[in-house]
Amino acid sequence: MMRTSIKIIVSAILGFFSSILILKGFEINFDPYVDEFVIAIFIIIVIVMGVSFGLYKQIISLNNKDVDGEEEDAVDIQIYKKLSDYALLTFSNFIFSLLALCITLITNKEIVIIILSLITVLICCILMSIMMNLYRLVPPHRPIIPRSSHKDYGNALLNVADDGEKHVMLIGFYKSYHLFCTALLIAIMFATFYSISSGNSQIFSIIAMSIVLVLANGKYYLSIRNK
């Protein structure tokens, strides 16, 4: 349900901005709307933090339940789903806070706004560390998940995962990789159209996105080639 809602929201946002760009002939000056945009981001961050905190409390409550048998399996499924929702919201909030910080630095906003943006980034980093601790503690009957600072975190994580979890991770990673590459290609095209129509060169952004795309594809194909 939550994933469906997120897809609808993201699609609506992308559709809205795409329509505006097309109607305006890609000649949009975002500077007059920066303040409202940053405020909207802060509001979203606060709301998402509230929802994340609610999920955190639910996870801890479920983890402390004294259950066994089929009920234990049902609780483990609930915990897994809520952990996934918590991880999605927490990482999204980190991106939102980083976006707000970057915008405030680029537009030379007041120092108070910059400090507030920096604080939200730090809070989101703390929430992400809490997320990693939740993954290490829940459920308690499985091997301990390695810390993200582990020198070989990828292999260490796979070693504690069972076959079913590896299959789920494989599907998730491949879908993410495919979406990432597709999204970058679309972003490159939009940046190109924006540069041509508005006269504001986005060459640096296009080069940076192209390099990231080459590195991502190179890492993927070299990984499967060397197996």
Image (spheres, rainbow, N blue to C red):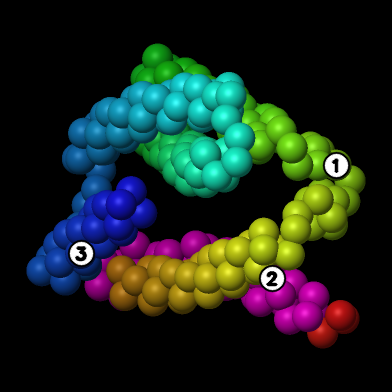
First in sequence, mark 1 or 2: give its number: 1
Residue 100: mark = none
Tell which tag, 1 or 2, sits nearer the viewer. 1
In the foreground, 164 or 131: 164
Q: Amino acid at mark 2?
A: Leu
Residue at 86 percent of width and 80 percent of height? 227
Image quadrant of residue 27?
bottom left
| Residue in the picture at 25% in, 34% down | 40
Name which residue type carries label 1: His
Where disc 1 sits, the SS reads: loop
User: Which element type, helix, strand or loop, lies under badge 2?
Assistant: helix
Q: Nearer the viewer, residue 106 or 155?
A: 155
Where 217 falls versus 30 (above or below)? below
The local crowd at label 1, few if under 14, some if 14 to 19, many if 20 or more residues have their Cα within 10 Å, is: few
Q: Residues within 10 Å of mark 2 (few under 14, many from 20)?
A: few
The residue range painted magenta reads 195-224
Work out whether mark 1 precedes mark 3 in sequence or the reverse, and give the earlier one.
3
Q: Residues within 10 Å of mark 3 (few under 14, many from 20)?
A: few
Residue at the bottom extreme, as displayed: 225
**Vertical placement of residue 152 versus 93, above or below:** below
Q: Amino acid at mark 3?
A: Gly
Give the Cα distance between marks 2 and 3. Answer: 29 Å
Q: Which residue is mark 2?
A: 215
Residue occupied by mark 1:
150
Looking at the rendered image, the disc whose residue lies closer to the viewer, 1 or 3, is: 1
